[in-house]
Image (cartoon, helix red, strand yellow):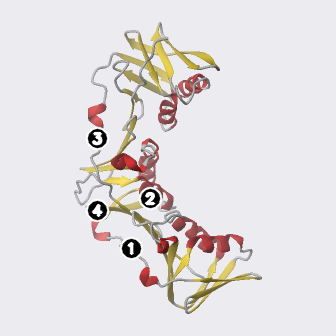
Amino acid sequence: MRFTANRQRLLDAVSVVSSVTGPKAVRPVLQNLRLVVDVSGATLLATDLEVAIRYRVELLEVEEVGDILLPVAKLSSILREGTADGVKFSLDDRSVRITCGGATWRINGENPDEFPVIPGFDEEKALTLERDTFSTLIRKTLFACAREKTRFAFHGVRMEVNGDELRLVATDGKRLAMKSASFDNTRDVKQAPIVLQKGLMTFERILGPDPKVQLCIEDKQVMVKSGCAEVSSRVADGVFPDWRNVLPKARLLKAIFPRLELMTALRQASVLTSEESRSVRMKFADGRMVLTSRAADVGDSRVEINCTIDGEPLEVAFNPDYLVEGLKNMEVAEVTLVLSGAETPACIEGEENFVYIVMPVTLRAG
């Protein structure tokens, strides 16, 4: 194997591919990327057995084709520290010599036959949708996933395809975000897999300048192709809750706020909370909402904000971080907070095809 590449272009590709690997891989071989060079360019492959990526890179010159496993962290560091525009690779048995400007490195590679097989993208099963639409769906739901991997299904995003609608739903058990969009389901696919959180993050990372993205949903994996990259994510096991079942059953109170003003008020009130008591009380009456919070041995806060209220006076408490995160991901001037009681889920409405539900915090006396 002998070739010359643009250093920055190759570094960008390695950076994307390396996001799939990790320093604590379940198998040492997974700390490598596979570099396959043919007469038309190079393909970089990486996987952690849950998410896999295949990334195509153009080369400046190919003198000899080849196939080798290289430690991704060392390769990334070499390319980052290089100073010339071009970088030359030369493979001698399992040793790779890398030259960039006046610097030369030699790193030992491994047998590519030891690397797991990464599936190719099946064009015949693919659905096509707008890149910006797909990116928006991910961005407006991924934040609500559970952070702990032990939550199984909650650590992923449910991707529902039904008719001409694509819907993504995420929850951590305390809040839930749903965003949907129309697209051309030409193959009449009807599935609802749970895509791993890391898979969705990698999907979003590969979205480049191409206006379209291809999506392939199978029983055990979901694949996305955009430009020069293909990513596959294993489907998570477990049962995902139906978001419709947690919508407020009754609407005892509706309060309409300017979105940015509500975010500001919540942040102001959250200053004097504690990790043990991360909650802000909301009291609705007389065309305004009063927010109060207290941190033991530190102090308390009181913030007032005007709003339009429809319903009976009510008092409820929430973790302010959950409300602010939902509001940050909305793109409207006004939002409506819908309450059905002090101990039942609340809903923030206002943006088309977006639903955000938050569980309240139990009120304590005082």
What crowding class fits label 3: few (fewer than 14 Cα within 10 Å), some (14-19), or many (20 or more)? some
Q: How many marks?
A: 4
Pointer 3 and pointer 2: residues touching (CB < 8 Å)? Answer: no
What residue lies at 59% left-to-right and 68% top-to-bottom?
A: 12
Q: Which residue carries the number 2 mark?
A: 203
Q: Residues within 10 Å of mark 4 (few under 14, many from 20)?
A: few
| Residue type, numbered disc 1 | Ile
Say which mark, if any, is on residue 118.
1
Q: Residues within 10 Å of mark 1 (few under 14, many from 20)?
A: some
Task: Using the image, tell me which numbered label, if any, was put on residue 241.
Answer: 3
- Identify which amino acid the numbered label 2 is placed on: Phe
Please tell me the numbered disc located at residue 220. 4
Label of residue 292 in the image: none
Q: Earlier in the sequence, mark 1 or mark 4?
A: 1
CA gap between label 3 and label 1 equals 31 Å
For marks 2 and 4, the one nearer the N-term is: 2
- Mark 2 neighbour density, 10 Å: few (under 14) some (14–19) many (20 or more): many
